[in-house]
Image (cartoon, rainbow, N blue to C red):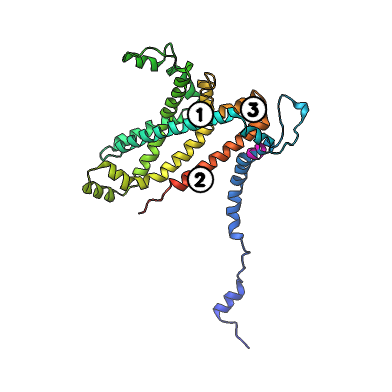
């Protein structure tokens, strides 16, 4: 007969181990994450699904008695054949390829200046002051733009007068109004590029950078072969965020020019707003918004595919 009087056997008999059900250890994490997932689905996904539903129906706020009949892809076909839609999209892409390279170039120049050794206090001061334009709301930036480029008392005309250039009506001329929008966008978002690129430069190993400076005095070669790999992740983030921001930019443009004069500054977001709330055609406006979302996703994927690179340590 086997004996069970040993201390080990007695302990095993007195405190039998309970087998934990599979997946129980993960349940607390699930319940902590679930509210965030539900909130994101409600706030982010539900409006998109509602816009997709609208885009497949004929829905005009000015004709409530007509109902919302299903029309399939008819709204999308109407948008793709709309010349004004393509004109607005072209102006938006022109704004993107004009403003963003200027912001990146000036931001990189400022970041390289602040990255120099012995400027710790200036870097700290710049990090604080550069946040101010980004923290300014779009509507306020638009109001500032109206004041800066005012024909009668604007700062822009005052500065041009110092070098003998006569007063001009910035917001009344199509080309100058477009340029004024680009200038205000560069003013607001160049600090963002500076901060992101400065963070990338701070990731470069100090020993590697000092060795490169001993090897060559060329700042361009150091930037190209040593610093650029550490800048590419931040550069990709800048391209994605600025592209998404410009494609949906509305407040600043509407406050500053209302899309005028004529349609000179009517970017795609202003045009979609006009179709949705001045023509009241919710179905067509929803189709335009969905196509814009698809374009934003495609551009983001292209940036990640062709620009993003991990720096090798």
Is residue 171 rendered magenta in the image? no
Q: Earlier in the sequence, mark 1 or mark 2?
A: 1
Image point (61%, 42%), residue name: 39
Q: How crowded is mark 3: few (under 14 residues within 10 Å), some or many (20 or more)?
A: some
**Distance (Cα) linking label 2 and label 3:** 29 Å
- Compared across the picture, whether 169 is left or right of 10 comes to left
Q: Residues within 10 Å of mark 2 (few under 14, many from 20)?
A: few
Q: Earlier in the sequence, mark 2 or mark 3?
A: 3
Say which residue label 2 marks: 301
**Distance (Cα) linking label 1 and label 2:** 22 Å
Q: Do the residues labelled 1 and 2 touch (CB within 8 Å)?
A: no
Q: How crowded is mark 1: few (under 14 residues within 10 Å), some or many (20 or more)?
A: some
Image quarter of the N terminus? bottom right
Residue 154 picture quarter: top left
The circle on residue 276 is 3
Image point (58%, 57%), residue name: 26
Name the front one of labels 3 and 1: 1
Image quarter of the C terminus? bottom left
Residue placed most toward the observer, 213 or 32: 213
**Distance (Cα) linking label 3 and label 1:** 19 Å
Specify whether residue 144 is in view: no
Q: Main secondary structure of the magenta part?
A: helix
Say if 272 sits above or below 18 in the image: above
Magenta segment boundaries in residue numbering: 47-51
The circle on residue 50 is none
Specify whether residue 80 is in view: yes
Image location (x, y in percent) of residue 174:
48, 20
Image location (x, y in percent) of residue 295:
55, 39
Say if 258 sits above or below 97 in the image: above
Mark 3: secondary structure: helix
Mark 1: secondary structure: helix
């Amino acid at each position: 007969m086997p004996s069970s009087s040993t201390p080990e056997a007695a302990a095993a008999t007195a405190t039998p181990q309970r087998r934990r059900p599979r997946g129980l250890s993960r349940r607390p994490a699930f319940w902590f994450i679930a509210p965030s997932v539900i909130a994101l689905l409600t706030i982010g996904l539900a409006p998109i699904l509602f816009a997709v539903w609208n885009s497949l129906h004929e829905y005009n706020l000015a004709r409530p008695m007509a109902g919302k009949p299903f029309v399939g892809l008819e709204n999308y076909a109407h948008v793709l054949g709309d010349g004004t839609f393509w004109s607005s999209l072209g102006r938006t892409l022109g704004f993107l390829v004009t403003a963003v390279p200027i912001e990146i170039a000036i931001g990189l120049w400022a970041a390289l200046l602040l990255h120099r050794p012995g400027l710790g206090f200036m870097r700290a001061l710049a990090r604080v002051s550069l946040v101010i334009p980004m923290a300014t709301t779009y509507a306020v930036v638009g109001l500032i733009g109206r004041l800066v480029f005012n024909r009668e008392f604007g700062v822009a005309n005052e500065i041009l007068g110092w070098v003998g250039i006569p007063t001009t009506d910035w917001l009344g001329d199509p080309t100058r109004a477009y340029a004024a929008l680009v200038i205000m966008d560069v003013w607001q978002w160049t600090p963002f590029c500076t901060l992101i690129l400065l963070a990338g430069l701070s990731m470069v190993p100090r020993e590697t950078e000092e060795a490169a400076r001993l090897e060559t005095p060329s700042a361009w070669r150091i930037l190209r072969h040593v610093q650029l790999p550490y800048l590419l992740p931040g550069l990709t983030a800048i391209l994605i965020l600025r592209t998404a921001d410009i494609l949906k930019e509305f407040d600043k443009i509407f406050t500053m020019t209302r899309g005028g004069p004529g349609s000179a500054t009517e970017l795609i977001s202003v045009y979609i707003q006009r179709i949705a709330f001045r023509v009241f055609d919710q179905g067509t406006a929803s189709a335009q918004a969905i196509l814009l979302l698809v374009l934003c996703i495609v551009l983001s994927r292209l940036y990640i595919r062709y620009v993003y690179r991990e720096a090798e340590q």
